C-alpha cells in the first residue's frame, strides 16, 4: 500500500520505518529540512534501539521529503504524527495538527484516503480534523468533497527504548472510525502484523509467545479515549506504588517485596509497579493533563488522575528532601546526578525527573554535576542553562561530591565498579532514585545508601 506519514518525531518515524519494513511504500513528510537531510543520509535524529538498522533494511521503501505534494497524492493512508504539546491549562496545543490537516486537505488526490490521527489528541479531535480537511479540500479543489477521504484514529502504545518491538509485536492494535471503509483499509494495512506473517528482523526476532495480535475496531471517540485511559492507568500504577513506598518507609517494609507480592496477582500484574522518582517522558504528563482538561469541559472532575499527578511531582521533591535529611545543608554541596533521559534506551528529555531534581538542587544552593551516556548532546541543545554542569566521564560525577543520585537506570550505571568511586567522594552518599542498586553491597563498600521508597538496608 502507498502510505504517507506526516511528522518524523518519535511516533511518526517509528511508524513509517516499520511500515516500510513490512513492505508498504512509505513517504515521510517533515517541514524541518535539516531533519529530512539527516534521514535521507540514513541517520535517525532520535536515539532508539534498532531504528537505524531497520531504516537501512527498509530503505528501498522509504522516501523523506518536506513537500506534502510528494507524499499525500495517491496515498491510501496518511498518518498524522505531529507534536501536540501541553498548553498552560493542560489542553494539547493543536496548531501543528491544524496545519497538517490543512496541508493534507489541499494535496489529497486519490480514489479514497484514510487520514489517521496517530498523535495523541483530545476526544473529538477526529471530527475536528475532518472538518478542517473538508474545508481545505473544498477551497483548494473548488468543489465539494464527496467521499474522497475519511478520518480514523489509530493510537500508539509504544514504549521509548522498545518502540520497534512494540510496533512489530504489539499487545493489540486499536483502530477507530465512523466510516466502515476506513476500518477495512487499516485492517489490510496491518494484516501482516495481525497475522504475524512477516519475516522478523534478525536483530529483533519474534518472541516465542507472540501469536495473532488482537484487533480492536471501534468508533472514533472510543479509540481516542482508549489511548488516554491506557496511559492514565499506567501512570496511576506508578504513582500508587510510590505512595505505598512512602508508607513502607514509615513501617519498615521492603517496597520491592511489597511490589513483587502485589504484582504476582494476575488481576494486577507486575509491570509499572517500580517505585522511584516517578514517571516522565512525552506521554504520561501530557495525557493525564489532557484527560483532566477534557473532563473539565463536561463539568466532571477526575480526582484519581489528579492525585496520580500530584504524587508523581512529589517524588521529585522527595529526592531533595532525602538529601536534606542526610546532609542537613545543601548550600555549597556538590551533588552528582547519573542519568538525564527520562528512562534508559532513549535520549528523550521531555518531563525528565532529572531536570526537575537538578533545578530543585540548584534552587537550594547546591552545585550539580550531570552525566548521561546517550542524551548529553540533546541536553546541551535543549537545556543550555544547565549544560555547563555536564560531565564527560562518570568519574567526574563522583569526584569530590557530597552525594550522587541515580536518576536513570542505564545499564552502564548498574554495571559500574562502585568500589572504585567511593574514595573519590567527599561524603560517600548514594541516593538510589530507581530502587535498583544493591543496598547491602553499597553499604559494605562504605556508602551511605538512601532510597526514596521503603527499602531498609537490613532486609
Image (tube, grey):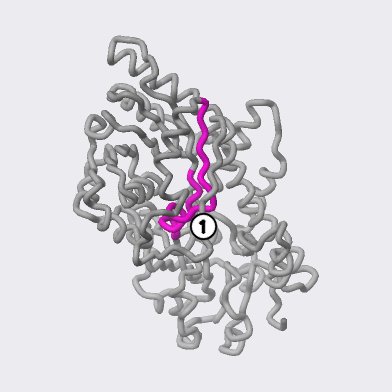
Instruction: Name the quadrant of the C terminus.
Output: bottom right
Disc 1: which residue: 211
Quick check: can you spot residue 424?
A: yes
User: In front here: 227 or 191?
Assistant: 191
Q: What x and y, as percent, mark residue 230?
A: 60, 46
Viewer-nearest residue: 445 or 134: 134
**Who's the residue at 32% across and 38% down the image?**
3
Whether the magenta-drawn stretch holds residue 267 is answered as: no
Q: Is residue 384 left or right of residue 437?
A: left
Pick the residue in front: 306 or 183.
183
Q: Which residues are magenta?
A: 156-178
Residue 202 position within the rendered picture, expressed as x and y whole percent measured from the top left: 34, 66
The residue lying at 38 percent from left, 59 percent from top is 48
Question: In the rendered image, which quarter contains the N terminus?
Answer: top left
Q: Residue furthest bottom?
A: 444
Is 163 part of what is drawn in magenta? Answer: yes
Find residue 79 and report its horizontal and vertical position in percent. 38, 36
The residue under the point 22% across, 42% down is 33
Q: Quarter-wise, where is residue 97 in the image?
A: top left
Amino acid at each position: 500500500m502507498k502510505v504517507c506519514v506526516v511528522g518524523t518525531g518519535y511516533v511518526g518515524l517509528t511508524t513509517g520505518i516499520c511500515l516500510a519494513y513490512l513492505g508498504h511504500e512509505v513517504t515521510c513528510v517533515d517541514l524541518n529540512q535539516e531533519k529530512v537531510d539527516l534521514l535521507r543520509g540514513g541517520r535517525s535524529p532520535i536515539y532508539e534501539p534498532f531504528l537505524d538498522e531497520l531504516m537501512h533494511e527498509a530503505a528501498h521503501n522509504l522516501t523523506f521529503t518536506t513537500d506534502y505534494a510528494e507524499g499525500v497524492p495517491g496515498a491510501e493512508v496518511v498518518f498524522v504524527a505531529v507534536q501536540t504539546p501541553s498548553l498552560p491549562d493542560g489542553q494539547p496545543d493543536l496548531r501543528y495538527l491544524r496545519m497538517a490537516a490543512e496541508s493534507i486537505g489541499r494535496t489529497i488526490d486519490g480514489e479514497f484516503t484514510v487520514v489517521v490521527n496517530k498523535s495523541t489528541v483530545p476526544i473529538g479531535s477526529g471530527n475536528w480534523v475532518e472538518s478542517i480537511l473538508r474545508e481545505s479540500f473544498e477551497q483548494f479543489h473548488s468543489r465539494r468533497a464527496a467521499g474522497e477521504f475519511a478520518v480514523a484514529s489509530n493510537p500508539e502504545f509504544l514504549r521509548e527504548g522498545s518502540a520497534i518491538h512494540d510496533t512489530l509485536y504489539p499487545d493489540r492494535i486499536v483502530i477507530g472510525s465512523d466510516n466502515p471503509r476506513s476500518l477495512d483499509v487499516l485492517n489490510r494495512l496491518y494484516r501482516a502484523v495481525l497475522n504475524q506473517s512477516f519475516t522478523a528482523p534478525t536483530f529483533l526476532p519474534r518472541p516465542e509467545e507472540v501469536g495473532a495480535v488482537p484487533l480492536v475496531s471501534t468508533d472514533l471517540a472510543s479509540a481516542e479515549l482508549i489511548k488516554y485511559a491506557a496511559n492514565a492507568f499506567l501512570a496511576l500504577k506508578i504513582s500508587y506504588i510510590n505512595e505505598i513506598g512512602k508508607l513502607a518507609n514509615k513501617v519498615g517494609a521492603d517496597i520491592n517485596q511489597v511490589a513483587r507480592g502485589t504484582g504476582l496477582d494476575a488481576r494486577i500484574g507486575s509491570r509499572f509497579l517500580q517505585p522511584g522518582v516517578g514517571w516522565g517522558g512525552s506521554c504520561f504528563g501530557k495525557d493525564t493533563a489532557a484527560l483532566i482538561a477534557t473532563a473539565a469541559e463536561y463539568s466532571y472532575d477526575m480526582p484519581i488522575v489528579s492525585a496520580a499527578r500530584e504524587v508523581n511531582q512529589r517524588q521529585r521533591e522527595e529526592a531533595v528532601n532525602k538529601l536534606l535529611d542526610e546532609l542537613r545543608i545543601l548550600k555549597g554541596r556538590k551533588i552528582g546526578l547519573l542519568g538525564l533521559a527520562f528512562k534508559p534506551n532513549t535520549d528523550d528529555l521531555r518531563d525528565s525527573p532529572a531536570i526537575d531534581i537538578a533545578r530543585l538542587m540548584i534552587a537550594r544552593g547546591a552545585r550539580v554535576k550531570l552525566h548521561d551516556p546517550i542524551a548529553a548532546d540533546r541536553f546541551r541543545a535543549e537545556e543550555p542553562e544547565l549544560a555547563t554542569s555536564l560531565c564527560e566521564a562518570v568519574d567526574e560525577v563522583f569526584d569530590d561530591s557530597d552525594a550522587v543520585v541515580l536518576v536513570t537506570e542505564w545499564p552502564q550505571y548498574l554495571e559500574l565498579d562502585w568500589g572504585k568511586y567511593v574514595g573519590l567522594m567527599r561524603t560517600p552518599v548514594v541516593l538510589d532514585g530507581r530502587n535498583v542498586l544493591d543496598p547491602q553491597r553499597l553499604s559494605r563498600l562504605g556508602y551511605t545508601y538512601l532510597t526514596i521508597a521503603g527499602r531498609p538496608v537490613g532486609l
